[in-house]
């Protein structure tokens, strides 16, 4: 149990945010992961446009730049750098050190939430965010043309930002006082940040009372103080607006939770490891929705390199499962080698809920396009995430996936059965 005494978190908006015209950026430091989490918003009249934030002094060398792109309604993010003396193009880094959290594009406005280490391991192309650093804000962004992206330095605002790890800390766990030996990481995070506990003060900070979280991402996704778009779902007796997050309901990448299950908002997923077949057997249970919907399990920390299993369900009737690899925030590519199995015996419908039983080898032979389920795995779960069209054409998700890290599945989630039968697949049917 946790001491129920109120706790508070302060974030100084003058030191931890920037706004100019239709561009805004907020940032916060999470000491446990040593990540800086950013929330960027940009409105543009262009259909295809770019924006972002850079770090470094352009007069002294390269600029480390995190680019956010909108093209044909799809959103992408890239870890890049700019060489001012070499045409000034955005050049992708050899390795990506930016973690995407959530994105949205609505009313010509893109909202991007992403994280990067305070001290990136890429000391060649990335700048440290420790101490003092010059931030380069792409306040107007620009259109995406066939000739590439060449930022106009006259439209990039510079500002020196200092001591993010001191001025912009969001550390909930230091306030937690467990009455038992249970660690904060294992406490149920469903009690987190009810909007009724958010109070605005007259200064530049916002106080959040009551609630707990193991990761700053929860706070970033929920807190109105970071100017995150929310939608009103009801009002209370005092006519105070109650809001819900527009993006992921849950983000837990600590790797300290249950290694064999995850409970989302209205759905749950669990998995076991079969030592005889070396298969990881999943079960996802969620409500039946009328129409053509897809649910998915992703493996990987970014849509630029994610192994995805997508299940297609038509009004509660499972149609098929397919193996995909995502290389961007567009529609993923279907793998030539299909490694997921949708089980006939473990898939069933009960009381307006569907339980999907599916499985895959811990390690497949498709080393190029499949990601391992051994060690620590960052899952992205999506239940009834979006519609699909004719030919099982996947459409953009309407709900954001939940992120969850599970570690040592092979060790902790062994199936307790002496004999195992080979799973019979569901026969595919027309969409």
Image: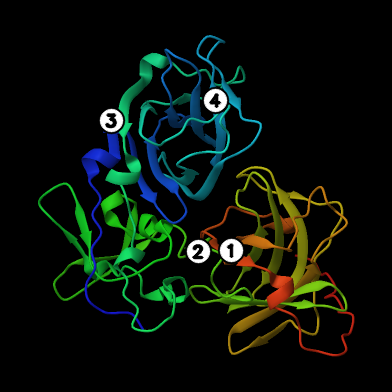
For marks 3 and 1, the one nearer the N-term is 3
Marks 1,2: beta carbons within 8 A: yes
Between the residue at mark 1 and the residue at mark 4, the CA separation in whole angstroms equals 29 Å
Between the residue at mark 1 and the residue at mark 2, the CA separation in whole angstroms equals 6 Å
Residue in the foreground of this view, choosing between 319 and 268: 268
In the picture of the structure, the residue carrying the numbered disc 3 is: 21
For marks 1 and 2, the one nearer the N-term is 2
Q: Which mark is residue 229?
A: none
In the picture of the structure, the residue carrying the numbered disc 4 is: 81
Between the residue at mark 2 and the residue at mark 3, the CA separation in whole angstroms equals 33 Å
Between the residue at mark 4 and the residue at mark 2, the CA separation in whole angstroms equals 29 Å
Q: Quadrant of residue 411?
A: bottom right
Residue 222, percent from left and from top = 35, 60
In the picture of the structure, the residue carrying the numbered disc 1 is: 405
Tell me the element at label 2: strand
Tell me the element at label 4: strand
Residue 332, percent from left and from top = 69, 49
Quarter of the image with the C terminus is bottom right
**Left or right: 216 as drawn, with respect to 324:** left
Of labels 2 and 3, the one closer to you = 2
Between the residue at mark 3 and the residue at mark 1, the CA separation in whole angstroms equals 37 Å
Tell me the element at label 3: loop
x 73%, y 81%: residue:
347
Marks 4,2: beta carbons within 8 A: no
Between the residue at mark 3 and the residue at mark 4, the CA separation in whole angstroms equals 24 Å
In the picture of the structure, the residue carrying the numbered disc 2 is: 252
Quarter of the image with the N terminus is bottom left
Marks 2,3: beta carbons within 8 A: no
For marks 2 and 3, the one nearer the N-term is 3
For marks 4 and 2, the one nearer the N-term is 4
């Amino acid at each position: 149990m946790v001491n129920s005494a109120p706790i508070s978190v302060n974030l100084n908006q003058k030191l931890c945010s920037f706004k100019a015209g239709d561009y805004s950026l907020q940032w916060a430091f999470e000491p446990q992961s040593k990540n800086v989490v950013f929330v960027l918003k940009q409105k543009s009249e262009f259909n295809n446009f770019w924006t972002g934030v850079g770090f470094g002094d352009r007069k002294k060398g390269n600029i480390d730049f995190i680019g956010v792109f909108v093209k044909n309604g799809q959103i992408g993010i890239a870890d890049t750098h700019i060489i001012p003396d070499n045409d000034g193009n955005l050049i992708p880094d050899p390795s990506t050190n930016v973690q995407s959290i959530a994105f949205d594009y609505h009313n010509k406005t893109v909202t991007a939430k992403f994280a990067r280490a305070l001290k990136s391991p890429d000391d060649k192309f990335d700048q440290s965010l420790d101490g003092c650093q010059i931030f380069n804000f792409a306040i107007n962004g620009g259109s995406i043309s066939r000739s590439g992206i060449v930022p106009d330095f006259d439209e990039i605002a510079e500002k020196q930002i200092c001591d993010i790890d001191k001025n912009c800390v969001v550390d909930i766990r230091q306030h937690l006082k467990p009455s038992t030996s249970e660690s904060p990481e294992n406490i149920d995070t469903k009690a987190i940040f009810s909007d009724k506990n958010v109070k605005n003060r007259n200064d530049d900070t916002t106080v959040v009372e009551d609630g707990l979280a193991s990761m700053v991402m929860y706070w970033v996704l929920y807190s109105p103080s970071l100017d995150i778009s929310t939608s009103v779902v009801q009002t209370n007796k005092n006519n105070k607006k109650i809001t819900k997050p527009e993006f992921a309901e849950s983000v837990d990448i600590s790797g300290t939770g249950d290694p064999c299950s995850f409970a989302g908002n209205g759905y749950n997923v669990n998995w076991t490891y079969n030592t005889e077949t070396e298969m990881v057997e999943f079960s996802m249970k969620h409500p039946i929705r009328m129409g053509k919907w897809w649910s998915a399990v992703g493996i990987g920390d970014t849509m630029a390199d994610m192994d995805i299993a997508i299940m297609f369900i038509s009004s509660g009737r499972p149609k098929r499962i397919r193996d995909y690899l995502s290389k961007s925030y567009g529609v993923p590519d279907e793998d030539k080698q299909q490694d997921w199995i949708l089980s006939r015996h473990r898939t069933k419908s009960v009381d307006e809920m569907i339980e999907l039983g599916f499985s895959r080898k811990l390690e497949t032979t498709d080393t190029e396009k499949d990601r391992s389920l051994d060690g620590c795995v960052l899952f992205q779960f999506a239940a009834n995430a979006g519609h699909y069209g004719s030919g099982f054409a996947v459409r953009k998700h309407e709900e954001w996936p939940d992120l969850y890290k599970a570690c040592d599945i092979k060790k902790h989630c062994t199936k307790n059965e002496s004999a195992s039968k080979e799973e019979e697949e569901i026969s595919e049917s027309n969409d």
